[in-house]
Amino acid sequence: MLKPVNPKINIDRLWKSLMDLAKIGATDKGGVRRLALTALDGQGRDLVVSWFKEAGLTVRVDRVGNIFARRPGKADILPVATGSHIDTQPSGGKFDGNYGVLAGLEVVRTLNDLDIVTDAPIEVCVWTNEEGSRFTPVLMGSGVWAGVFSAEHVLGQKDIDGKVVKDELKAIGYLGSELLGPGGKKAGYKAYFESHIEQGPVLEDSNLPIGVVTGALGQRWFDVVVNGLEAHAGPTPMNLRQDALLAASMLVQDVNRIALSESPHGRGTVGSMRVSPNSRNVIPGQVIFSVDFRHPNNDGLDRMHATLKQACDRVKAQCSVEISLTIVSEFAASVFDKDCVAAVRRAADQHGLASMEIVSGAAHDAVYVSRVCPAGMIFIPCKDGISHNEIEDALPEHIEAGCNVLLGAMLKMANLE
Amino acid sequence: MLKPVNPKINIDRLWKSLMDLAKIGATDKGGVRRLALTALDGQGRDLVVSWFKEAGLTVRVDRVGNIFARRPGKADILPVATGSHIDTQPSGGKFDGNYGVLAGLEVVRTLNDLDIVTDAPIEVCVWTNEEGSRFTPVLMGSGVWAGVFSAEHVLGQKDIDGKVVKDELKAIGYLGSELLGPGGKKAGYKAYFESHIEQGPVLEDSNLPIGVVTGALGQRWFDVVVNGLEAHAGPTPMNLRQDALLAASMLVQDVNRIALSESPHGRGTVGSMRVSPNSRNVIPGQVIFSVDFRHPNNDGLDRMHATLKQACDRVKAQCSVEISLTIVSEFAASVFDKDCVAAVRRAADQHGLASMEIVSGAAHDAVYVSRVCPAGMIFIPCKDGISHNEIEDALPEHIEAGCNVLLGAMLKMANLE
């Protein structure tokens, strides 16, 4: 049989697998609720593992429940891998994570159909607890694999009812005995790709089917506390006020301006705010709010941080209030491997799929994997940019396009010629 | 005995009465908790009534528990009155309301000491439930007296435990049989004065002992609902957002600017704000906040309202959000009687007390009284402008100054020469 130059996946088979997996934990509104390490997660894992085995893959499970399904290659070299997660948000959708895992399965099924044997082994990964909705930390499985967290630490984590990761893994039959990661060394995979819905509006807005992901935004999160003076709204003239909400509202504007000045990839969000005493006719004495800054590089985050500090000083003087700014969380920016990025771009071109470079605004398993081996990602549009929601949706033509690009990129990296 | 030209009150006696009354419902932090129509309110009323009777006054109680204590005059003309309230906020102070009642008592005691008989009768009023903390409406007693509310309506009002005004008045022995107000006609008193702590910072900031109150600000309260689009803070670029909190923060600035453009008496306050979903890494989809506008005249309130509407239209377009603006409450501006205002100013001058004109930012019993007869108010400074708080405080020298001005103004209006 002559091998096709540009092999294509079977969208009907991939779509059916996505819909079959989505039945486990299906919600009334068309979404999925399948929290990490619950019985439903166990059922989902069993189904996916049965598909892996039907496709002839060798399945191993590590100490933290990550699943690795391998297809042998011709050469004794590191595998080319792909994957994602199948745990969901409490009100999650059918595609977030699941698409990345089942696209990997579909790549294997297509290689089987076409009787293609790659030089490098092919491996499909199912990472444990990416969402972090039930157990922290988020990105738990890929984090342990990449050496960010110790297995002992995450195995001892508890959910809100006091249930422990290790016990819950055992209960669903996914507590393995080995650690299969590269142990923090630059090893593990020759290349890792992850296909994922964008979870944002950029591709849809640009009317493009493929995002060539060049990296992930770094994140720096702050708490801001503004202390003014609580006073009666009636008897207190404007010029004698120390209005904490007026000051906070100026800083909300500043956060927005700072992010706009780092276009197109800078992001600045005030997502939560608490006003005290929060009474209609009392000038607010205290406001506490969050700031979420994101930027493709750490210098950019430093610039945003420095400008926010200056804004706090200015508003402090202008409104006669006290302001404290505290970092509560940081996540370094990631730049994906240039060969992996190029392989994704070329695969899109080969399939005649229009693409654009895009930076992931959210973290994904690929971000931790990229810390120890070459990695890249493929984004496809999702309806209205909505994710982490039961109404999350994606078009079969985009699901197909992303999986064809994944196949092309993996074949490119898995062959030595 | 020769009558003094410029009689003075006895501050030691007034201060002692204030401190004695403050013992009833005294709190650990030096404040008072004496909610309307509780047993403590009954004890406070009994003490004040006993003082009225010791001073030779004739005491009557009306259908809604207002207390009227009269000293006869020489002529058959309408009385000159003063008063305030002795109910407090849940965490109230010693001076709010109590000062106005006991200053009236001290005026009578001084007239008795000096054997002065005025042409007009002198009357001291204790208005029921000014604070509105336990029963609504606020300004209940003076409102009924002035014909704003019907007695039947307020007698049927219930507190949070379902207890009814009429029953509670009866229980403390203050359910009278008559309605003693002017029945909505321009009658009742030749003049009414109320001395009160300012409850704001203006006099203290200006280092002046006396505020000649020319009226009370009108109030117009709004709810503003901003609907944007909830979205992930990471993957959503700045230019594709519909951030409800960004829009709300612009309007907070506008509320402030609108009030500043109506200096010095315009006020604009956003006191409460609720952000949804209020999560650190989610762009807010909805923000609901309050606006409290105050102005010395109703045209000014209309201007502020119109400018806020324009601001909502501008922000709506700028941020791609929907905004609704709803009036939740209105209170017309009051302008006090020019002769009463002049009497207060002259009395301050006669006592060598520096004064300034001031507009009350809050409502007081005098505001309702002013709707049916000539009225005025005297403000004195309170520490840091703080009121409705256990740490509310005022200096004896200011308490004395305000009471001397009250005496002078009442004598001016009570004599026919």
Image (cartoon, coloured by chain):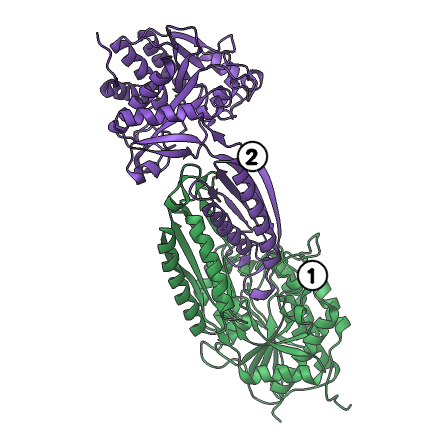
Chain colours: A purple, B green
Q: Quadrant of the N terminus of chain A?
A: top left
Mark drawn on residue A329: 2
Q: Secondary structure at mark 1?
A: helix
Image label count = 2
Left or right of B227, for residue B348: right
Quadrant for residue B3, please give it. bottom right
- The image shows residue B224 at horizontal and vertical percentages of 41, 55
- The image shows residue B345 at horizontal and vertical percentages of 63, 82
Q: Secondary structure at mark 2?
A: strand
- The image shows residue A219 at horizontal and vertical percentages of 51, 35
The answer to whether residue A282 is above or below residue A371 is below
Q: Quadrant of the C terminus of chain A?
A: top left
Mark drawn on residue B22: 1
Between B38 and B177, the residue placed more toward the observer is: B38
Quadrant for residue A364, please give it. top left
Visible in this render: residue A61?
Answer: yes
Give the CA distance from mark 2 to mark 1: 51 Å
The answer to whether residue A329 is above or below residue B7 is above
The answer to whether residue B191 is above or below residue B219 is below
Chain of the residue under label 1: B
At a point 39% along the width and 56% down the height, the residue shown is B315
Tell me, yes or no, whether the two marked residues, 2 and 1, touch with CB atoms within 8 Å: no
Judge depth for marks 2 and 1 and give the one in front: 2
**Which amino acid type is marked by label 2?**
Ser
Chain of the residue under label 2: A
Visible in this render: residue B178?
Answer: no
